[in-house]
Image: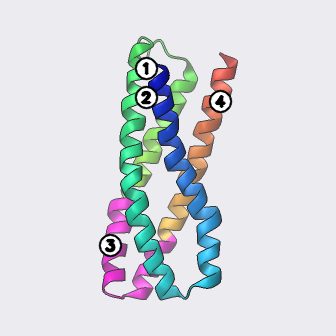
Amino acid sequence: MTYFKLIHLLAVLVWVGGMYFAYIVLRPAAVDVLQPPQRLGLWDNVFRRFFNWVWVAVGLIFVTGFYMIYQSGGMARVPGYVHSMLMLGILMSIIYAYVFFACYVPFTLHVAKQRWPEAAALLGKIRKLVALNLTLGVMTIAVAVVGVSWG
């Protein structure tokens, strides 16, 4: 089960750490040095690369998480913090799917057609949802750490 925990943790690191880097580091740097059309092109490129990794990470998180739950005797036997982690993970995944399909897909089309105002509006929506998912991700990590330490 140790390898499953490691894979689970690394997948969380990719997803939550990637959101942290994008939101806290890359976004302000891009605003400082790029004009809006270049910034939108950068984000299109960044999202394309990052979202491929997020799909893999989300899949690994659920596969390893459900396997560890199964190995622990099922949902009825795992501690309450595992239920909380699962609920938060499902919520984060729903938000991510919305960001990808309802925001990112049209965003890429607007960038490709150089419809900058429409692309910028979608980027603003993505930014807010990433902030929400980043917050939920940090909360999930806190639940995991505190839950494990309380035993």
Q: CA distance from mark 1 to mark 3?
A: 37 Å
Of labels 1 and 3, earlier in sequence is 1
N-terminal of the pair, mark 4 or mark 1, is 1
> Three-letter amino acid code at disc 1?
Ile
Q: Inspect this view and state whether residue 88 appears.
A: no
Q: Residues within 10 Å of mark 2 (few under 14, many from 20)?
A: many
Instruction: Give SS at disc 2.
Output: helix
User: Vertical placement of 137 versus 113: above or below?
Assistant: above
Give me the disc on residue 51.
none
Of 11 and 145, nearer the camera is: 11
- Name the amino acid type tagged 4: Val
Earlier in the chain: of badge 3 and badge 2, it is 2
Residue 102 in picture, x, y percent from top left: 34, 64
Circles 4 and 2 in contact, beta carbons < 8 Å: no
Of callouts 3 and 4, the N-terminal one: 3
Range of magenta residues: 99-124
Kindly identify the amino acid type of the residue bearing the numbered disc 3.
Pro
Label 2 amino acid? Gly
Badge 3: residue crowd in 10 Å (few <14, some 14–19, many ≥20)? some
Q: Are marks 3 and 4 in contact (CB under 8 Å)?
A: no
> Which quarter of the rendering shows the N terminus?
top left
Which residue position is annotated with label 1? Answer: 69
- For marks 4 and 2, give the CA distance: 15 Å
From the image, tell me which residue sits under label 2.
65
Residue visible at 50% across and 48% down in the picture: 14
In the drawing, does residue 65 fall left or right of residue 19? left
The residue beneath circle 3 is: 106
Determine the CA span between mark 1 and mark 2.
6 Å
The residue wearing badge 4 is: 145
Q: Secondary structure at mark 4?
A: helix
